[in-house]
Image (cartoon, helix red, strand yellow):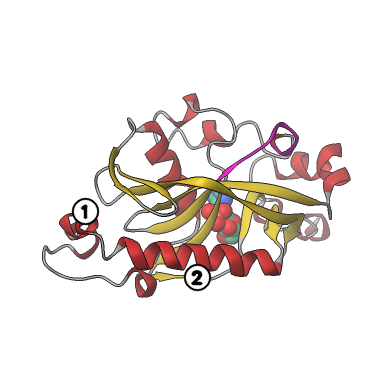
Amino acid sequence: SLLEETSLPLYFGWFLLSSVQVKVGCTAMDFLKTLDTLEAFKKHIADFTGQAEKEVDLEQYFETKETLHCTTKFCNYGKADGAKEYAKNPVVKKSYGSVFSLSLTALFVTPRTVGARVSLTEEQLQLWPADTEKESEVGIPGSASLPVGSRAHITLGCAAGVEPVQTGLDLLQILILPEGEAVEEMELGSLRYYGEGRWMLSLREPICAAACFSSFYG
Ligand code: 2AM
């Protein structure tokens, strides 16, 4: 029935508490501000602009849309595979409304998206659908062999015309590649280049982010 279909959310996930949103947002902005001034980045500027020598202001390049969150299950109001089963999972029900501590271990940037990698604990993995990485295999060959939870991330921004679903795919694509060349030691950690405009900064000190497990209806 219509009621049953609309009673499921657009997605479930961990929603950063508002003070943490500010902290993570500022860290991301500082990173972007520094990244586009690095010689190593400028060397590969054409990945972003299509032209060498052209400058890019990464802070302007990406747009932020929703409140910062880490999607666990995209339900599409019940139309997505496994949505009903996920909503019925006792762990999901029990955890609904609880606050978790997420560990943000890396920041990554591509010409399409900017995001934070989330390293899930065993407890948090209980809320992570086991087939997420396998389902990405069609778009990102090789992702099915990554550890469960590899796709966990927070979308921090998207380039004009790019949908946020792209952020998780960009992360998986970086993770299946051989480790990139370390190009720069930054204050926050070491920056690696993965080709085709893909950059990842492994944080020296992971960011601890308090987040409420809940859902978004829109
Ligand atoms: P995100 O988790 O990478 O940010 C609403 O669009 C939210 O659901 C966004 O947070 C978005 O991406 C996520 N989302 C949209 N479509 C999705 C899909 N097919 N699979 C997984 N997550 C999706």
What x and y, as percent, mark residue 101? 72, 49
**Which quadrant of the picture is home to ligand 1?**
bottom right
As for residue 123 lying within the magenta part, the answer is: yes
What residue is shown at x 11% (from left), y 67% (from top)?
53
What residue is shown at x 35% (from left), y 71% (from top)?
61
Looking at the rendered structure, the number of numbered marks drawn on it comes to 2
Q: Quadrant of the N terminus?
A: bottom right
Label 2's element?
A: loop
Residue underneath mark 2: 64
Magenta stretch: give its range.
118-124
Residue at the outermost top position? 145
Residue underneath mark 1: 40
First in sequence: mark 1 vs mark 2: 1
Amino acid type shown at disc 2: Thr
Foreground: 190 or 143?
190
Residue 32 placement: quadrant: bottom left
What x and y, as percent, mark residue 146? 49, 28
Q: Is residue 62 left or right of residue 182?
A: right
Foreground: 117 or 36?
36
Q: Is residue 67 left or right of residue 45?
A: right
Label 1's element?
A: helix
Foreground: 183 or 69?
183
Amino acid type shown at disc 1: Ala
Q: Is residue 21 left or right of residue 170?
A: right
- Label 1 crowding class (10 Å Cα cut-off): few <14, some 14-19, many 20+? some
Q: Quadrant of the C terminus?
A: bottom right
- In three-dimensional space, the C-alpha distance between marks 1 and 2, rounded to whole angstroms, equals 25 Å
